[in-house]
Image (tube, rainbow, N blue to C red):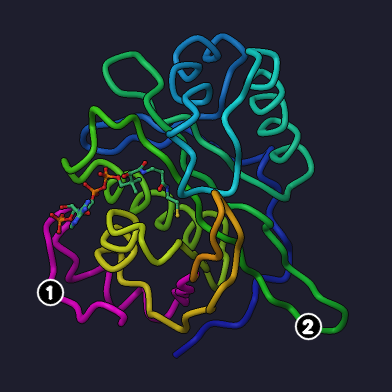
Protein backbone atom coordinates (compact mmCIF):
# COMPACT_ATOMS: atom_id res chain seq x y z
CA UNK A 1 0.00 0.00 0.00
CA UNK A 2 1.21 3.54 -0.77
CA UNK A 3 2.84 5.18 2.24
CA UNK A 4 1.78 8.64 3.51
CA UNK A 5 4.27 11.53 3.09
CA UNK A 6 7.01 11.99 5.65
CA UNK A 7 6.19 14.70 8.16
CA UNK A 8 9.61 16.33 8.01
CA UNK A 9 10.93 17.25 4.59
CA UNK A 10 14.59 16.18 4.37
CA UNK A 11 17.31 18.66 3.43
CA UNK A 12 19.67 17.55 0.67
CA UNK A 13 22.49 19.44 2.35
CA UNK A 14 22.13 17.17 5.40
CA UNK A 15 22.25 13.91 3.44
CA UNK A 16 25.21 11.85 2.24
CA UNK A 17 25.07 12.47 -1.50
CA UNK A 18 27.97 10.31 -2.62
CA UNK A 19 26.56 7.08 -4.06
CA UNK A 20 28.58 4.06 -5.12
CA UNK A 21 27.29 1.78 -7.87
CA UNK A 22 29.11 -1.35 -9.09
CA UNK A 23 30.97 0.58 -11.83
CA UNK A 24 30.51 4.26 -10.97
CA UNK A 25 30.72 6.88 -8.27
CA UNK A 26 28.01 9.54 -8.16
CA UNK A 27 28.90 12.68 -6.24
CA UNK A 28 28.10 16.43 -6.24
CA UNK A 29 29.98 18.50 -8.83
CA UNK A 30 33.20 20.40 -8.05
CA UNK A 31 34.53 23.39 -10.02
CA UNK A 32 37.58 21.28 -10.91
CA UNK A 33 35.30 18.97 -12.96
CA UNK A 34 34.94 21.63 -15.63
CA UNK A 35 37.72 20.28 -17.87
CA UNK A 36 36.34 16.73 -17.75
CA UNK A 37 32.88 17.76 -18.98
CA UNK A 38 33.87 20.60 -21.33
CA UNK A 39 34.24 18.24 -24.36
CA UNK A 40 30.55 17.29 -23.96
CA UNK A 41 29.06 20.62 -22.85
CA UNK A 42 30.82 22.42 -25.73
CA UNK A 43 29.91 19.93 -28.50
CA UNK A 44 27.11 21.50 -30.58
CA UNK A 45 25.71 18.08 -31.57
CA UNK A 46 25.70 16.58 -28.06
CA UNK A 47 22.64 18.24 -26.46
CA UNK A 48 20.38 18.05 -29.51
CA UNK A 49 17.95 15.63 -27.83
CA UNK A 50 18.04 17.57 -24.56
CA UNK A 51 16.66 20.98 -23.53
CA UNK A 52 19.99 22.85 -23.31
CA UNK A 53 22.33 24.29 -25.94
CA UNK A 54 26.07 23.68 -26.16
CA UNK A 55 28.21 26.10 -24.17
CA UNK A 56 30.33 28.59 -26.12
CA UNK A 57 32.56 29.45 -23.15
CA UNK A 58 33.99 27.39 -20.30
CA UNK A 59 32.52 29.96 -17.93
CA UNK A 60 29.03 28.67 -18.91
CA UNK A 61 30.04 25.16 -17.89
CA UNK A 62 31.37 26.55 -14.60
CA UNK A 63 28.04 28.35 -14.22
CA UNK A 64 26.25 25.03 -14.69
CA UNK A 65 28.44 23.45 -11.99
CA UNK A 66 27.69 26.38 -9.66
CA UNK A 67 23.96 26.01 -10.33
CA UNK A 68 24.09 22.36 -9.28
CA UNK A 69 25.53 23.40 -5.90
CA UNK A 70 22.85 26.08 -5.56
CA UNK A 71 20.13 23.50 -6.30
CA UNK A 72 21.38 21.34 -3.43
CA UNK A 73 21.53 24.36 -1.09
CA UNK A 74 18.00 25.42 -2.14
CA UNK A 75 16.73 21.83 -1.74
CA UNK A 76 15.25 21.94 -5.25
CA UNK A 77 17.69 19.97 -7.44
CA UNK A 78 20.11 17.19 -6.69
CA UNK A 79 22.66 16.79 -9.48
CA UNK A 80 25.42 14.19 -9.44
CA UNK A 81 28.62 14.04 -11.45
CA UNK A 82 29.05 10.49 -12.75
CA UNK A 83 32.64 9.43 -12.17
CA UNK A 84 34.27 6.48 -13.93
CA UNK A 85 37.97 5.68 -13.60
CA UNK A 86 38.58 9.03 -11.88
CA UNK A 87 36.95 11.17 -14.61
CA UNK A 88 33.56 12.80 -14.79
CA UNK A 89 31.76 11.19 -17.73
CA UNK A 90 28.17 12.29 -17.23
CA UNK A 91 25.43 13.78 -15.13
CA UNK A 92 22.32 12.44 -13.48
CA UNK A 93 19.91 14.49 -11.44
CA UNK A 94 16.61 14.91 -9.67
CA UNK A 95 15.20 18.25 -10.74
CA UNK A 96 12.37 20.48 -9.60
CA UNK A 97 12.11 18.62 -6.30
CA UNK A 98 8.81 19.71 -4.85
CA UNK A 99 7.09 18.62 -1.67
CA UNK A 100 4.10 20.89 -1.44
CA UNK A 101 1.63 22.54 -3.81
CA UNK A 102 -0.86 24.67 -1.87
CA UNK A 103 -2.72 22.22 0.39
CA UNK A 104 -1.34 19.16 -1.43
CA UNK A 105 1.75 17.17 -0.65
CA UNK A 106 3.21 16.10 -3.98
CA UNK A 107 6.71 14.85 -3.03
CA UNK A 108 8.12 14.51 -6.55
CA UNK A 109 11.02 15.25 -8.85
CA UNK A 110 11.99 14.93 -12.50
CA UNK A 111 14.86 12.66 -13.53
CA UNK A 112 17.43 13.84 -16.08
CA UNK A 113 20.75 12.49 -17.38
CA UNK A 114 23.47 12.43 -20.01
CA UNK A 115 26.58 10.32 -20.56
CA UNK A 116 29.77 10.56 -22.62
CA UNK A 117 29.04 8.98 -26.05
CA UNK A 118 32.07 6.65 -25.86
CA UNK A 119 30.35 4.87 -22.94
CA UNK A 120 26.86 4.44 -24.42
CA UNK A 121 25.26 1.03 -24.64
CA UNK A 122 26.99 -0.59 -21.63
CA UNK A 123 24.10 -0.18 -19.21
CA UNK A 124 25.89 2.59 -17.31
CA UNK A 125 23.06 5.12 -17.29
CA UNK A 126 20.55 2.52 -16.23
CA UNK A 127 22.93 1.63 -13.38
CA UNK A 128 23.45 5.27 -12.35
CA UNK A 129 19.76 6.17 -12.54
CA UNK A 130 18.79 3.00 -10.67
CA UNK A 131 20.93 4.12 -7.72
CA UNK A 132 19.48 7.63 -7.91
CA UNK A 133 15.99 6.10 -7.69
CA UNK A 134 17.05 4.04 -4.65
CA UNK A 135 18.19 7.33 -3.06
CA UNK A 136 15.10 9.25 -4.20
CA UNK A 137 12.58 6.78 -2.80
CA UNK A 138 14.74 5.78 0.19
CA UNK A 139 16.85 8.49 1.85
CA UNK A 140 14.96 11.37 0.30
CA UNK A 141 11.52 9.81 0.67
CA UNK A 142 9.99 11.14 -2.54
CA UNK A 143 6.71 9.62 -3.66
CA UNK A 144 6.90 10.01 -7.44
CA UNK A 145 9.62 10.46 -10.06
CA UNK A 146 8.71 11.70 -13.50
CA UNK A 147 10.81 11.65 -16.65
CA UNK A 148 10.37 12.61 -20.28
CA UNK A 149 12.24 12.28 -23.53
CA UNK A 150 11.84 13.25 -27.13
CA UNK A 151 10.15 10.50 -29.08
CA UNK A 152 13.20 9.93 -31.30
CA UNK A 153 15.50 9.44 -28.30
CA UNK A 154 15.55 5.64 -28.48
CA UNK A 155 18.44 5.21 -26.01
CA UNK A 156 16.71 7.30 -23.35
CA UNK A 157 13.42 5.47 -23.93
CA UNK A 158 15.16 2.17 -23.25
CA UNK A 159 16.77 3.50 -20.07
CA UNK A 160 13.35 4.67 -18.86
CA UNK A 161 11.70 1.35 -19.74
CA UNK A 162 14.46 -0.68 -18.06
CA UNK A 163 14.01 1.36 -14.87
CA UNK A 164 10.34 0.37 -14.69
CA UNK A 165 8.67 3.70 -15.43
CA UNK A 166 5.06 3.67 -16.64
CA UNK A 167 4.36 5.41 -19.93
CA UNK A 168 1.68 8.02 -19.31
CA UNK A 169 1.41 9.92 -22.54
CA UNK A 170 2.69 11.39 -25.74
CA UNK A 171 2.65 15.15 -26.16
CA UNK A 172 2.31 15.96 -29.83
CA UNK A 173 4.39 18.83 -31.28
CA UNK A 174 5.63 19.63 -27.80
CA UNK A 175 8.97 21.39 -28.33
CA UNK A 176 10.57 23.27 -31.22
CA UNK A 177 14.18 22.58 -31.97
CA UNK A 178 16.36 22.54 -35.08
CA UNK A 179 13.56 23.57 -37.40
CA UNK A 180 10.84 21.13 -36.29
CA UNK A 181 8.28 20.42 -33.60
CA UNK A 182 9.06 17.23 -31.70
CA UNK A 183 6.79 14.87 -29.78
CA UNK A 184 7.60 14.27 -26.12
CA UNK A 185 6.96 11.05 -24.22
CA UNK A 186 6.13 11.29 -20.53
CA UNK A 187 6.60 8.61 -17.85
CA UNK A 188 6.20 8.30 -14.09
CA UNK A 189 7.23 5.94 -11.32
CA UNK A 190 5.58 5.91 -7.91
CA UNK A 191 7.26 4.67 -4.75
CA UNK A 192 4.77 1.83 -4.64
CA UNK A 193 5.48 0.71 -8.21
CA UNK A 194 9.22 1.04 -7.53
CA UNK A 195 8.97 -1.27 -4.52
CA UNK A 196 7.32 -3.85 -6.82
CA UNK A 197 9.52 -3.57 -9.90
CA UNK A 198 12.90 -2.92 -8.28
CA UNK A 199 13.00 -6.18 -6.35
CA UNK A 200 12.85 -8.25 -9.52
CA UNK A 201 14.84 -5.84 -11.69
CA UNK A 202 17.83 -7.34 -13.46
CA UNK A 203 20.01 -4.25 -13.21
CA UNK A 204 21.27 -3.00 -16.57
CA UNK A 205 19.96 -6.11 -18.36
CA UNK A 206 17.43 -5.71 -21.14
CA UNK A 207 13.88 -6.42 -20.08
CA UNK A 208 10.99 -6.91 -22.39
CA UNK A 209 8.38 -4.18 -22.02
CA UNK A 210 6.07 -2.97 -24.74
CA UNK A 211 7.38 0.25 -26.21
CA UNK A 212 5.03 3.22 -26.50
CA UNK A 213 3.82 3.82 -30.02
C1 LIG B 1 20.33 8.29 -23.20
C2 LIG B 1 21.69 7.89 -22.61
C3 LIG B 1 21.86 8.54 -21.27
C4 LIG B 1 21.72 6.36 -22.46
O1 LIG B 1 22.90 6.00 -21.75
P1 LIG B 1 23.48 4.50 -21.83
O2 LIG B 1 24.46 4.32 -20.74
O3 LIG B 1 23.88 4.21 -23.22
O4 LIG B 1 22.16 3.68 -21.50
P2 LIG B 1 22.06 2.11 -21.26
O5 LIG B 1 23.24 1.42 -21.87
O6 LIG B 1 21.77 1.92 -19.83
O7 LIG B 1 20.75 1.75 -22.11
C5 LIG B 1 20.62 2.21 -23.45
C6 LIG B 1 19.68 1.28 -24.18
O8 LIG B 1 19.23 1.91 -25.39
C7 LIG B 1 19.52 1.05 -26.48
N1 LIG B 1 19.75 1.93 -27.64
C8 LIG B 1 20.53 2.99 -27.72
N2 LIG B 1 20.43 3.55 -28.95
C9 LIG B 1 19.56 2.79 -29.64
C10 LIG B 1 19.03 2.83 -30.95
N3 LIG B 1 19.38 3.80 -31.79
N4 LIG B 1 18.15 1.87 -31.31
C11 LIG B 1 17.79 0.91 -30.46
N5 LIG B 1 18.24 0.80 -29.19
C12 LIG B 1 19.12 1.74 -28.81
C13 LIG B 1 20.72 0.26 -26.02
O9 LIG B 1 20.87 -0.91 -26.77
C14 LIG B 1 20.32 -0.02 -24.58
O10 LIG B 1 19.26 -0.94 -24.51
P3 LIG B 1 19.47 -2.51 -24.09
O11 LIG B 1 20.09 -2.48 -22.73
O12 LIG B 1 18.09 -3.02 -24.16
O13 LIG B 1 20.40 -3.04 -25.15
C15 LIG B 1 22.83 8.35 -23.57
O14 LIG B 1 22.58 7.83 -24.85
C16 LIG B 1 22.99 9.84 -23.66
O15 LIG B 1 23.67 10.45 -22.84
N6 LIG B 1 22.36 10.47 -24.67
C17 LIG B 1 22.47 11.89 -24.88
C18 LIG B 1 21.79 12.67 -23.78
C19 LIG B 1 20.33 12.31 -23.65
O16 LIG B 1 19.66 12.03 -24.63
N7 LIG B 1 19.85 12.34 -22.40
C20 LIG B 1 18.48 11.99 -22.08
C21 LIG B 1 17.56 13.11 -22.37
S1 LIG B 1 15.87 12.62 -22.11
Front in this rendered view, residue 44 or 61: 44
For the record, the magenta segment spans 184-213
Residue 53 vertical position relative to residue 35 in the rendered view, above or below: below
Q: Which mark is residue 183?
A: none
User: Which residue matches tag 1?
Assistant: 208
- Vertical placement of residue 111 versus 189, above or below: above
Task: Nearest to the eye among marks 1 and 2: give it.
Answer: 1
Relative horizontal placement of residue 91, taking residue 69 as reference (left or right): left
Q: Which quadrant holds residue 12?
A: top right
Q: Which residue bears the numbered disc 2?
A: 104
**Residue found 41% across the figure and 31% down from its top:** 90
| 185 left or right of 74 in image | left
Q: Secondary structure at mark 2?
A: strand
Secondary structure under tag 1 reads: loop
Picture residue at 44% right of the left edge, 90% below the top:
1
Q: Residues within 10 Å of mark 2 (few under 14, many from 20)?
A: few
Amino acid sequence: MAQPPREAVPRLADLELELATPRLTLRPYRDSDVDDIWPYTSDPAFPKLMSWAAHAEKSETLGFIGSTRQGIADNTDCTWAIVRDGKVVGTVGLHGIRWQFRAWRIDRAELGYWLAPALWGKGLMTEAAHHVLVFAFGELGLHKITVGCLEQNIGSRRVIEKLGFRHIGRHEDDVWRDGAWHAHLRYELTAERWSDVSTTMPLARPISRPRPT
